[in-house]
Image (cartoon, helix red, strand yellow):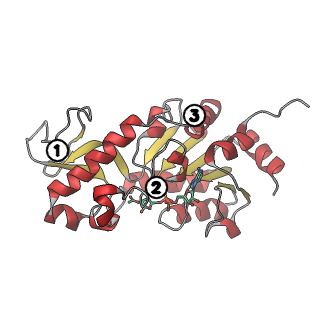
Amino acid sequence: MNLADARAALRSARRIAVLTGAGVSAESGIPTFRDAQTGHWARFRPEDLASPGAYRRDPETVWQWYAGRYADVTRATPNAAHHLLAGLEREKGSGFFLATQNVDGLHARARSGSHGGRLVELHGNLSTARCETCGTVAPLPDPETFTPPPTCPVCASPMRPNIVWFGEYLPEDALEAASHAFRGAEVALIVGTSGVVYPAAGLALEAMGAGGVVIEVNPEATELTPYLSHSVRDTASRGLAALLEPDQPR
Ligand code: OAD
């Protein structure tokens, strides 16, 4: 399938499922998970901070790391790729489903999930915390005034970052909804994700297996590339513009 076919498939599809990863936020200046390890944090591996074991051993350090990342994403703003996906949802309405592996909240800030479609943050969100005792999820205070750890507004127990850590399961309802949307999608878009980490590969292949057209947007080839209908080898903002923006008059 070539770019013109991919554009036509997107235009005519009523059911669209999108999966995004760190690459979609690169143009907002948010480093990918691994690139984020600079300065003081360079001596830690992400796996040593983003895990239940790390939190049990040293909750203070883990919270400080997340508080820093929370401050960084709050300063960032959604880029053209986030806005193009929100625009696609405005066009398709309830047939639109967006699953993101990102925890930066930028899709929600671009108003994805507010135009009749659905946004699912598979790995949680940096701007909220979850009570370790009663499960209440609450927004963090403004980063300027936030001193971790937060306490639960309902039961006053300590709260943990509301993130799915290494070794933890993704929320079953979110995963089930994503799987359902990808199996039913006429077109699936896989944007800015390396495709090696579960569930990225699974969702893309489920959509292919069910007869959908699956289009990747990524400046680099990924492990998924050989199996997909078409790949746009470009950044998220330029690649999505090439797929979604109206034809330019000659
Ligand atoms: P990765 O860091 O594995 O992959 C980022 C992808 O973005 C790569 O394939 C890049 O080629 C691509 N990329 C870079 N710049 C881009 C741009 N401007 N536009 C489009 N794509 C670009 O990130 P994810 O696939 O999101 O898990 O990783 C998935 C999960 O693994 C993360 O959510 C995290 C990680 O370990 C948890 O935190 C639980």
Tell me where residue 206 sits by quadrant: bottom right
At a point 80% along the width and 44% down the height, the residue shown is: 8
Tell which tag, 3 or 2, sits nearer the viewer: 2
Answer yes or no: disc 2 within 8 Å of ligand 1. yes
At a point 88% along the width and 29% down the height, the residue shown is: 249
Tell me the amino acid under the disc marked 2: Thr
Give 193 or 220, whichever is nearer the viewer. 220
Spatial CA span between label 3 and label 2: 20 Å
Tell me the amino acid under the disc marked 1: Pro
Image position, residue 18 (x, y; %):
58, 48
Image position of 180 (left or right of 151): right
Q: Which mark is residue 148?
A: 1
The reply to whether the C-beta atoms of the residues labelled 1 and 2 are less than 8 Å apart is no
Give 133 or 79, whichever is nearer the viewer. 79
Helix, strand or loop at label 1? It is loop
- On the image, numbered disc 3 is attached to which residue? 83
Of mark 3 and mark 2, the one earlier in the sequence is 2
Image quadrant for the N terminus?
bottom right
Q: Is residue 166 visible?
A: no
Image position, residue 227 (x, y; %):
68, 68
Tell me the amino acid under the disc marked 3: His
Q: Which mark is residue 112?
A: none
The reply to whether the C-beta atoms of the residues labelled 3 and 2 are less than 8 Å apart is no
- On the image, numbered disc 2 is attached to which residue? 32
